[in-house]
Amino acid sequence: MDHEDTKTQRQALDEKVQETARLAVDAAFQVHSNLGPGLTEKVYEACFLYECSKRGMTVARQVHVPIQYGEIRIEAGLRLDMILNDCVVIELKAVESLNPLHKAQLITYFKLTGLRLGLLINFNVSMIKDGIQQIIL
C-alpha cells in the first residue's frame, strides 16, 4: 500500500516569507550587536521594530488574536508580539532560556492566524544565533 497520498505535503514557503524571515534575523542580529543581553523585552521590542522598519518591512505590533471555537468567537486578550509583512510571526523574549511552552505558543499563533512561519527570538543570550529558533508549520 502506498502511504504517500496519506501524508501531508507541505508547500514550500514563498520568496516573500523567506526574505521577511531573513530580514528579521538580520534585524535581531543588529539589535543584539548594539545592546547585548540583559535588558527588558519591551526595550528589545522597540529596537527590533525600528530595525525592521529600517529594512522596509511592515510591522503589526501587539496583534490581537481572537479564538474561534466552533461557532463562537472568544476575545481572550491574546496578543502576539509582531507580524512582519503580513506573513511572519515574531515572538520576542528576554528570558534565561526558551522552554517548550514558548514554541507551543508560536504554533498556536500559526493555527489562529493561518500563517506558517515564525521566529522565536530570545535576546537574553551571549550570542544571538543561540537565541533564534525558526519554526515552520
Image (cartoon, rainbow, N blue to C red):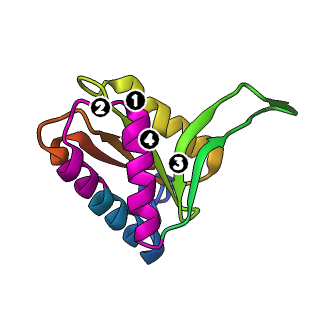
Q: Which mark is residue 82?
A: 3
Tell me residue 11's x, y (percent): 47, 66
* Tally of numbered tags: 4
Tell me residue 128's x, y (percent): 19, 45
From this view, report whether residue 88 is shown above or below residue 17.
Answer: above
Tag in front: 4 or 1: 4
Q: Which residues are magenta?
A: 28-56
Type of amino acid at the residue the image marks with label 3: Met
From this view, report whether residue 114 is shown above or below residue 65.
Answer: below
Q: Which mark is residue 91?
A: 4
Q: Dot 1 surroundings within 10 Å: few (below 14), some, or many (20 or more)?
A: some
For residue 93, which quarter of the picture?
top left
Tell me residue 26's x, y (percent): 27, 62
Q: Earlier in the sequence, mark 3 or mark 2?
A: 2
Question: How far is disc 3 from disc 2 in space, using C-alphas?
Answer: 19 Å
Q: Which mark is residue 102?
A: 1
Question: How far is disc 2 from disc 1 in space, using C-alphas?
Answer: 19 Å
Tag in front: 3 or 1: 3
Q: Earlier in the sequence, mark 4 or mark 1?
A: 4
Q: Is the residue under label 1 in contact with that under label 4 (CB below 8 Å)?
A: yes
